[in-house]
Amino acid sequence: MQTPLRPNLVQQAFDPDFFRHVGHQLIDQLADYFQAAQKGQTMAVMPWEKPDERTNHFQTLLEAAPDENAQDFFAYLIAQNIHTLHPHYLGHQVASPAPLNALADLLASAMNSGTGVYEMGSPMVAIERVLIKNLNRVLGYGPQADGFMTNGGTLGNLTALLTARQARQAREGLSSLPKPALMVSEAAHYCVDRASKVMGWGEAGLIKIPVDAQYQMRADLLPAYYEQALKEGKTIVAVVANACSTATGAYDNIEVIADFCEMHQIWLHVDGAHGAAVIFSDKYKKKVEGIHRADSVVIDFHKMLLTSALTTALLYKNGDDSYLTFSQQASYLWADDEEREWYNLGKRTFECTKSTLGLKAYLLWRTYGPDLFAQHIDYLYDLGHYFAEMIAQSDDFALPVAPQSNIICFRYCPTEVPKEELNALNSFMRETLITSGAFYIVQTQLAGQLYLRLTLISPFTTVATLEDLLQNLRALGQQYLLENRLLPH
Ligand SMILES: *Cc1c(COP(=O)(O)O)cnc(C)c1O
């Protein structure tokens, strides 16, 4: 029998000199890019190409002979991708990542540590532990709190709700609950709806509490909805509070909701994917007053905290609860501390192989201190309030609601334009604006009306950027009105 030899392509794929060469090139490319993107002057924020054309480009490359030239390939990717660092990036809630993220990812990928099992990446597991412990302290939890990093707010919310169910079953000594249900604001993120479906609770398992004119949950209605649910034989397992909501950035009143949950011994989960980050800010943390009373909280670093995706923390007020989620035996028999093994995170996470999720946020914290996060949030929220003031003072734009965060909805609505034209008008403006590459913004529906929606997220967006945006939008609005003969002559 022949001795197997290492195949030449595999040998080639591990060539350290090639890595050194291409790696240095890429770091230079990225450093140049960071410099240019911050200014954003000559760069389209979102270089637009139709999905099929983009796909063809990469299919063609793959069909050609294998090619070691990575520099041009990287250059294309950098140039053609959306630029979340660009001052004109005002779209979805995705961070402009600080450059250090890229280095942490490089290292994490090189080491390929798993964080589900301690032995598979002990420094990375320890880093995650320290990040979580410090985050819990900033949030106001006591020493018994715990948690872990997971792959996104969506998975974090689902995991927290699975824990809530297990904890309730444990308390009642049951292996299943009669008609389990959640109470959520009708402005909750769609992932809560999905979580309910994944858990098999269906439509009946999601009780939507109406919102007020500020898009905050009507917490005063919780008792009535609760009574009704009990009459229908339902078990209210958890209430989910928004901090803040995705569409309008509204913060629910956590103190009032926590009072209700405590009175009825219901799990309180705070979906703070976007806005719980304000715990770092002395100026804005009052928006989440009472958050330390929640049984669980989700916070995404990859939204407001300058970290690239996915970097989500799921925090528990009582660390013991986190061991219940996936416990397979009678869950009221808590395993002893020995068997819990905090450092084998896979016992508590959905993920089996879990990548290095805490390194980037830890590195930012260690390098610049937590004030980095505070300063960024203060700037974004201050800018949000400033922009809202600009809109309030203009006579051709309007706000549906005073913004509470860096998420702002607004629309163009000059008095002479009939109301039924406004959706088409604003839709045209957004479409034309973003495909031109000038700005990236999104849109949302509120009470059947289409609104333009901004998330202020780039540290390089300024008041001048926002003035420029309004000028661009006005020009497009006028163009639409002219073309559609909606302007008085
Ligand atoms: C973004 C967001 C989510 C989803 O988080 P991902 O990290 O994108 O999975 C959930 N809830 C709220 C309120 C959000 O803003």
Image (cartoon, rainbow, N blue to C red):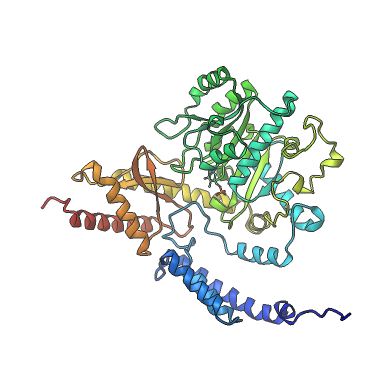
For residue 448, side relative to residue 374 (left or right): left
Q: Residue at x 39, y 71 (%)?
A: 42
Q: Looking at the image, which is closer to me, 307 or 312?
A: 312
Residue 112 screen position, x and y as percent: 72, 63
Q: In the rendered picture of this protein, how many numbered marks are placed on residues?
A: 0
Furthest residue in direction right, as rendered: 1
Q: Is residue 371 above or below residue 243?
A: below
Please say whether residue 117 is visible from this viewpoint. yes
Please say whether residue 140 is visible from this viewpoint. no
Residue 13 screen position, x and y as percent: 70, 77
Residue 469 screen position, x and y as percent: 34, 57
Residue 228 screen position, x and y as percent: 53, 19
Q: Residue at x 47, y 52 (%)?
A: 92
- Image quadrant assignment for residue 133: top right
Furthest residue in direction left, as rendered: 489
Q: Looking at the image, which is closer to me, 311 or 62?
A: 62
Furthest residue in direction front, as rendered: 1
Q: Residue at x 70, y 50 (%)?
A: 351
> Image quadrant for the N terminus?
bottom right
Q: Residue at x 63, y 36 (%)?
A: 161
Q: Is residue 230 above or below residue 162?
A: above
- Image quadrant assignment for residue 281: top right
Q: Looking at the image, which is closer to me, 194 or 47?
A: 194
